[in-house]
Image (cartoon, grey):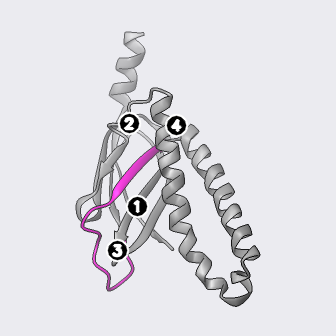
């Protein structure tokens, strides 16, 4: 068992990243960035789709979809943020040590160390000019350091 753990540790790498904002906007003073292992990334994707479908149904029933369909985009960051909280809670209930998977990103910059190779989803949330914003990216971590720029998702 020790040999397996040592081998995994020696294969680990890091992810360094920056949150990209729309031109003319300042980077967030602080953001929360979560590195979701594949199992939890799949859960996040499924729950987010379900939450957005539920929000859309309420949006349709209220008549807002006919009057001002563009307003629905405001629901997207809310769905992502609330689902992210649910998934992080699930990770903790499962006994996963989340300390190395959740980072604060001052000025939109972050780094995860000792990441085992594999597929992950990075989800970042921040408030810019009083509005919730979200960044997501699915990444494949190999044996070398990964440097990424997360693109803003409306």
Which numbered disc, 2 or 4, marks the residue that appears first in the sequence? 4
Whether residue 122 is visible to the viewer of this picture, yes or no, is yes
Query: Label 2: which residue?
Result: 98
Element under label 4? helix
Q: Position of residue 23 (x, y in %)?
A: 36, 83
Q: Nearer the viewer, mark 2 or mark 4?
A: 4
Inter-mark Cα distance, 1 to 4: 18 Å
Query: Label 4: which residue?
Result: 90
Inter-mark Cα distance, 2 to 3: 25 Å
The residue lying toward the viewer, choosing from 81 and 123, is 81
Q: Nearer the viewer, mark 1 or mark 4?
A: 4
Which numbered disc, 1 or 2, marks the residue that appears first in the sequence? 2
Q: Residue at x 45, y 26 (%)?
A: 95
Element under label 2? loop
Inter-mark Cα distance, 1 to 3: 10 Å
Residue closest to the far front: 62
In magenta, the rendered stretch is 20-36
Q: If the image is split into quadrants, where does the N terminus sit?
A: top left
135 up-or-down from 70: above or below: above
The residue lying toward the viewer, choosing from 76 and 122, is 76
Q: Which mark is residue 125?
A: 1
- Which corner quadrant of the image does residue 31 belong to? bottom left
Which numbered disc, 2 or 3, marks the residue that appears first in the sequence? 2
Q: Residue at x 36, y 33 (%)?
A: 12
The residue lying toward the viewer, choosing from 96 and 1, is 96
Query: Label 3: which residue?
Result: 128
The residue lying toward the viewer, choosing from 21 and 140, is 21
131 up-or-down from 96: above or below: below
Element under label 3? strand
Q: Residue at x 45, y 33 (%)?
A: 92
Element under label 1? strand
Q: Residues within 10 Å of mark 4 (few under 14, many from 20)?
A: some
């Amino acid at each position: 068992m020790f040999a397996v753990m040592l081998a995994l540790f020696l294969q680990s790498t890091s992810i360094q990243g920056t949150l990209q904002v729309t031109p003319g906007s300042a980077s967030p003073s602080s953001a929360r960035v979560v590195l979701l292992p594949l199992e939890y990334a799949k859960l996040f994707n499924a729950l987010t789709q379900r939450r957005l479908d539920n929000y859309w149904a309420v949006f349709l029933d209220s008549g807002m979809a006919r009057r001002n369909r563009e307003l629905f985009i405001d629901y997207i960051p809310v769905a992502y943020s609330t689902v992210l909280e649910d998934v992080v809670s699930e990770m903790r209930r499962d006994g996963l040590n989340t300390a190395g998977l959740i980072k604060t990103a001052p000025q939109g910059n972050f780094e995860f160390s000792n990441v085992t190779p594999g597929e992950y989803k990075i989800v970042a949330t921040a408030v810019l000019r009083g509005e919730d914003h979200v960044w997501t990216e699915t990444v494949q971590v190999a044996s070398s350091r990964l440097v990424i720029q997360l693109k803003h998702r409306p």
